Image: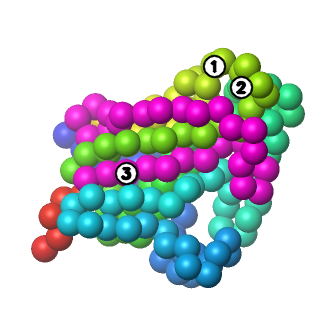
Amino acid sequence: MSTAEQRAAQLGLDIPDYADPPYGRRYGRRLKAFHRTGNLVEFSGITPENRQGDRLFPGTVGADVTLEQANQAARLTAIHALGMIRYAVGSLDNVASLSRALCFVMCTPGYEPLYDVSNGATDLFLDVFGDEIGSVGRATIGAASLSRNNCFELWLSLEASPEE
């Protein structure tokens, strides 16, 4: 059976390195990339923008952004989350279990297929971590506005393997 790192490589994912240069400070002086308490790791909001700030499909789902584009943005956000996981715990293989994914979709009022957008992120987690570790409790909330006009944002929590 392959590891999460091996599956990510097999999928050909271009996972960003948030340790080089160090993450943070673009959006606030005191912003932390993550907070670890024991084996619980809570991440700051992660969006579909690269290290240079270029955004994938900015705008409102249901108006400027299609469902398919939003799903791609959610998938890219999950790839960025993998980079944040490496930054926080050293390796994707150090994840014991994903616990919570709180997803925000900037969308038009009454937009209903929010879960289809979030599937772009959580399906990728299943592909990388497998059913046991990658199945996550999830909620998706429609939002009138998100930071920098991003169409998707993810708050992720996980249980890491104990630190040695």
Question: Of marks 1 and 2, which one's residue comes earlier in the chain?
Answer: 2
Which is more foreground, mark 1 or mark 2?
1
Q: Which disc number belongs to residue 67?
A: 2
Q: Is residue 145 left or right of residue 48?
A: right
Which residue position is annotated with label 3?
Answer: 157
| Residue 13 lies in the magenta stretch | no
> Is 164 drawn above or below residue 53 in the view shown?
below
Q: Which amino acid type corresponds to the residue marked 1 in the rendered image?
A: Pro
Residue identified by numbered label 1: 113
Q: Residue at x 28, y 31 (%)?
A: 131
The residue type indicated by label 3 comes to Ser
* Residue drawn where x is 26% and y is 66% of the image: 37
Q: Residue at x 61, y 81 (%)?
A: 29
Q: Which residues are magenta?
A: 131-159
Rendered location of residue 11, percent (x, y): 46, 43
Residue 3 lies left or right of residue 114; in this view the side is left
- Label 1, label 2: how many angstroms apart (C-alpha)? 8 Å
Can you tell which mark lies on residue 23? none
**Is any part of residue 129 visible from this angle?**
no
Q: Gap in Å between the C-alphas at discs 3 and 1?
A: 23 Å
Residue, x 23% and y 35% (percent of image)? 132
Q: Position of residue 100 (x, y in %)?
A: 37, 42
Q: Quadrant of the N terminus?
A: top left
Q: Are marks 3 and 1 in contact (CB under 8 Å)?
A: no
**Display coloring:** rainbow
Q: Inspect the magenta stretch and tell me whether residue 142 lies in it.
A: yes
Task: Name, please, the residue furthest toward the right.
Answer: 64
Given contact means CB atoms under 8 Å apart, are the residues at marks 1 and 2 in contact?
yes
